[in-house]
């Protein structure tokens, strides 16, 4: 939960669904690890996934 709170201020509002529990593991894997280790500071938001990859695994 702390990672999601850390990311939210920098995440585009139209992509908040990527922060939902169902998608979080995939989103977290795409973030820059060194940026996530810091307590404060901006993060690099990865580009959105292509439409065919946005579907959650069944």
Image (spheres, rainbow, N blue to C red):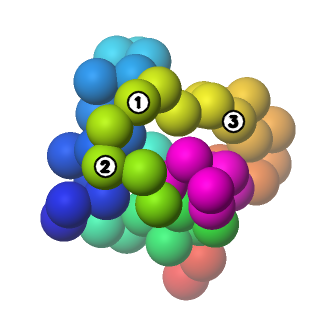
Residue at the spot x=53%, y=33% of the render? Answer: 43
The magenta stretch spans which residues?
30-36
* Rendered-image quadrant of the C terminus: bottom right
Nearer to us in this view, 55 or 6: 6
Is 37 covered by the magenta stretch?
no
Residue at the spot x=31%, y=49% of the render? Answer: 39
Q: Provide the residue designation for mark 2.
A: 39
Q: Secondary structure at mark 3?
A: loop
Can you give x and y, in whole percent of width and height, for residue 47 in the image? 73, 29
Q: Report the mark closest to the observer, 1 or 3.
A: 1
* Rendered-image quadrant of the N terminus: bottom left
- Separation of residues labelled 1 and 2 (CA atoms): 7 Å
Is 31 covered by the magenta stretch?
yes
* Crowd class of label 2 (few under 14; some 14 to 19; many from 20; radius 10 Å): few
Vertical comparison of 31 with 42: above or below: below
Taking 20 as reference, is 54 left or right?
Answer: right
Q: Provide the residue designation for mark 1.
A: 41
Asked whether the beta carbons under mark 2 and mark 3 sit within 8 Å of each other, the answer is no
Q: Provide the residue designation for mark 3.
A: 46
Q: Quadrant of residue 41?
A: top left
Q: Secondary structure at mark 1?
A: loop
Residue 6 can be seen in this image: yes
Nearer to us in this view, 28 or 50: 28
Taking 31 as reference, is 11 left or right?
Answer: left
């Amino acid at each position: 939960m702390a990672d999601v709170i850390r990311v939210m201020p920098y995440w585009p509002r139209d992509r908040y669904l990527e922060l939902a529990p169902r998608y979080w593991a995939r989103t977290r894997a795409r973030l820059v690890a060194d940026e996530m280790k810091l307590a404060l500071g901006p993060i690099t938001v990865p580009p959105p996934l292509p439409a065919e990859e946005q579907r959650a695994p069944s």
